[in-house]
Image: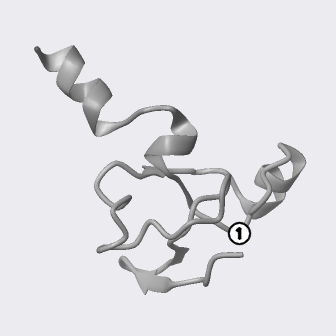
Amino acid sequence: MAKKTMITFGTPLLNEFCCECGRSVRPGSGLFANRIPDGNSITVRAEMGRPYPEGDFVCCECDGVTSDDWEEKLN
């Protein structure tokens, strides 16, 4: 399981890992730029069957969107 990394934006602490695969999405991970915040609570994510419900993001690979996909759409 990915190491939990906590940062603060304002008040809430964020778990900077993907709730689908458990990989880090913090700066320097290679997945930071295209991460998608998951606004659901841990309880809701667990009910949805997310393997890592404590993660506050979905990485671009688990979401199915990559930088290459955006390049194709823009051109």
At 55% from the left edge and 68% from the top edge, which residue is drawn? Answer: 17
Residue at 44% in and 65% down: 25
Please state the total of marks drawn on the protein image: 1
Q: Position of residue 74 (x, y in %)?
A: 14, 18
Residue 46 located left or right of residue 17: right
Q: Nearer the viewer, residue 32 or 14?
A: 32
**Colouring scheme applied when the structure was drawn:** one colour
The N terminus, quarter of image: bottom right
Q: Residue at x 36, y 79 (%)?
A: 10
Q: Is the residue 68 above or below the residue 31 in the image?
A: above
Relative vertical location of residue 7 with respect to residue 58 in this rendering, above or below: below
Horizontal and vertical percent position of residue 22: 65, 65
Task: Identify the amino acid type marked 1.
Answer: Glu
| Residue 55 lies in quadrant | bottom right
Q: Is residue 57 left or right of residue 35?
A: right
- On screen, residue 30 versus residue 49, left or right, reads left
- The x, y position of residue 48, in whole percent, is 83, 43
Above or below 54: residue 47:
above
Position of 14 relative to 68 (above/below): below
Secondary structure of residue under mark 1: loop
Q: Residue under circle 1?
A: 54
Q: Left or right: 69 with respect to 17?
A: left
Q: Which residue is at the front of the view, 37 or 23? A: 23
